[in-house]
Amino acid sequence: MFILRKIYSFFVDTFQTILIVASFFLVMYIWFFRPFQVNGSSMFPNFEDKEYVITNLIAMRFEDPKRGDVIVFKAPVDHEKEFIKRVIGLPGDTISLKNGEVYINDQLFDQSSFLKSNVKTYGQSFLKDGEKVTVPNDNFFVMGDNRPYSSDSREWGFVKKGEITGRSMFIYWPVEKIQMITNPLGN
């Protein structure tokens, strides 16, 4: 009888521990941090296909994304999917593309901290070369770092603040790529 009571106690304690740990991770997942898997090459070379990133969900509840932040958001065409892109334009900014360069508020945007100098940015169906768009309130203009192969705001327009899942903060897989994700513009 004593042994059965010990076994019963062991299983009850183990179950309670598992339940507490699972509850903790569920709360963290729902309210604070969520993993995100990069799919495709739209953010190459800064983020590679199949990398896993921790996204900070709570940051977006207290502050807006800053230019240069990497965010995860609901895909404009299919809300079941999420995209990862870099914030380029903030509410009120005018964005234009000329000769493969990005201009914000009629000033050449220096992207050298996250793009190689030979990367050119050309228009797509929403923002064409030589045109100018103004980012509406509570919206953002985003682009992938791999400009020739990115479906981004140049193609489908602005990202609404309410569609943003969170700010990417940490690459945790594969192990050799572990690193914090910082805003290269120092914002």
Image: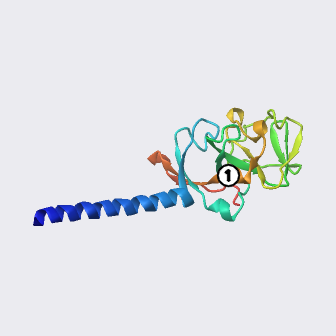
Residue closest to the eye, 5 or 125: 5
**SS state under label 1:** strand
Which residue: 69% across, 60% down? 186
Q: Quadrant of the C terminus?
A: bottom right
Res. 143 image quadrant: top right
Which residue: 77% across, 45% down? 158
Which residue: 28% across, 61% down? 14
- Name, please, the residue furthest toward the left: 1
- Name, please, the residue furthest toward the front: 1
Residue 62 in view: yes
Residue 138 horizontal/vertical position (percent): 78, 55
Residue closest to the eye, 123 or 162: 162
Q: Quadrant of the N terminus?
A: bottom left
Residue 105 horizontal/vertical position (percent): 87, 51
Res. 3 image quadrant: bottom left
Residue 89 in view: no
Q: Which residue is mark 1?
A: 164
Residue closest to the eye, 99 or 7: 7
Q: Which colour style is shown?
A: rainbow
Identify residue type, mark 1: Ile
Query: So how many labels did they put on this image?
Result: 1
Is 65 placed above or below 156 here?
below
Residue 164 horizontal/vertical position (percent): 67, 51
Is 10 placed above or below 112 here?
below
Residue closest to the eye, 75 or 171: 75
Q: In the figure, is residue 57 to the left or right of 15?
A: right
Res. 169 image quadrant: bottom right
Residue 78 horizontal/vertical position (percent): 66, 38
Q: In the figure, is residue 62 to the left or right of 95?
A: left
